[in-house]
Amino acid sequence: AVKDQDQQSVRDLLGQDVDVNAREGDGATALHWAVVRNDAIVVDELLRVGADVNAANDYGVTAISLACLNRNAPMVETLLVAGADPNAVTSMGETVLMTCAGTGSVDAAAALLDHGAANINAKEVSYGQTALMQASAQDNPKVVQLLLAHGADVHARSTSYLLPVSLGDPLDDTGGGAVMMPQRGFTPLLFAARHGHVENALLLLDAGANVNESAPSGESALVIASFSDQSEVATLLLERGADPHDASAGYTALHTAVVRGDLELVKALCAEGADPNIRLIKGSPQRREAYWFGLSERWSGATPFWLAAKFAEVDIMRVLADNDADPLLSSDNGTT
């Protein structure tokens, strides 16, 4: 009856003293389903007759987590007033605050904090992400601002793993042998850089994030923004003092901007003094199913101008030449 949103049948059944906390095979209760359906009337009826507001299904998901998933702030408030735990955690370590942060309901997140959500810097199990990381990866600047105001750690990092990646040629099928390289290990700023959320990045920088911080792979926030085709964030980072020469990953933001064909970012990098003759030290990690925009290990020694020539980016070649690029520099294998 709850699933069908048949409110009269729900009332009739409750009048027959049915077990309001009866569970389905996965542990879900009627309250779970009423919240999923955003049915405030049935939720009130169930709570009135003793529904367990903190009942969790087999995955540790409580009703308030579902309300957060639905971005239903009034429902979140109703459940909190009824005694829902603002620090509830799923079996995978995801707090309800993380759920709100990821879905972008600032009112729901504020309600949780007002009712005592205390684990603001908790990390979920799968990737070690915090609520601030999840908000930063989405276009949720109001949630980012709220979390920062309540002490969210701007320097926290997600879990880093050594994962097999290809350093093969992105333009053919031969590939290269898989190598183990550090992946993930992102801070909130790195998430904002990868996903292109300028306002989030600005808030994080104002809160003390290091404009030159990098992932375990060596990619700086600027390189990540450039490689992810997020030129607005890259430009912001440059304006805030990001190092255009950083080649800790084996390549610079200028290399990646050229591969992406981002003429305006190439201009911005050159204006900040990026070296058009800096050489590619090593290739970039590439997923087996996504070779596009990679920097092949076979191009070691390539300059940004060399890459622009390879990809026939004539306008970029002109900009680089105007900024003292040497058109005669070859890659390590002697190719010009």
Image (tube, helix red, strand yellow):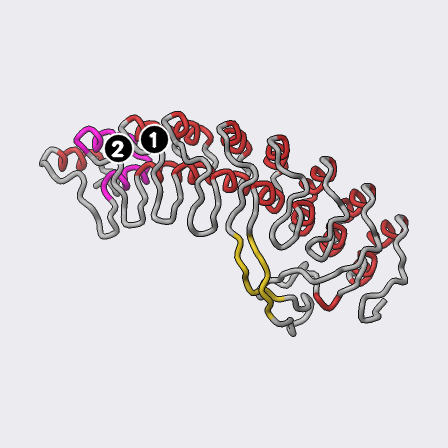
Which residue type carries mark 2?
Val
Between the residue at mark 2 and the residue at mark 1, the CA separation in whole angstroms equals 9 Å
Whether residue 224 can be seen here: yes
Measured from the top left, where is residue 35 in percent x and y? 31, 37
Residue at the location (30% across, 32% down)? 84
Q: Is tag 2's residue or tag 1's residue first in the polypeptide sequence?
A: 2
- Residue 129 sits inside the magenta stretch: no
Check disc 1: other Cα within 10 Å, few if <14, some if 14-19, many if 20+.
many
Q: For mark 2, what is the residue?
A: 43
- Give the main secondary structure, helix, strand or loop, of the magenta stretch: helix
Which residue type carries mark 1?
Met
- Residue 44 sits inside the magenta stretch: yes
Task: Find numbered disc 1 in the image and state the secondary structure of the residue it sits on.
Answer: helix
Measured from the top left, where is residue 313 in percent x and y? 80, 56
Q: Which residues are magenta?
A: 29-50
**Image quadrant assignment for residue 48:** top left
Task: Find numbered disc 2 in the image and state the secondary structure of the residue it sits on.
Answer: helix
Are discs 2 and 1 less than 8 Å apart at CB? yes
Whether residue 66 can be seen here: no
Q: Is residue 167 above or below residue 142?
A: below
Q: Is residue 157 above or below residue 176?
A: above
Q: For mark 1, what is the residue?
A: 75
**Image quadrant in which the N terminus is located:** top left
Q: Is residue 104 above or below residue 282?
A: above
Residue at the location (46% across, 38% down)? 121
Check disc 2: other Cα within 10 Å, few if <14, some if 14-19, many if 20+.
many
User: Going by the picture, which residue comes out furthest to the bottom?
Assistant: 174
**Image quadrant in which the C terminus is located:** bottom right
Measured from the top left, where is residue 85 in percent x and y? 31, 34
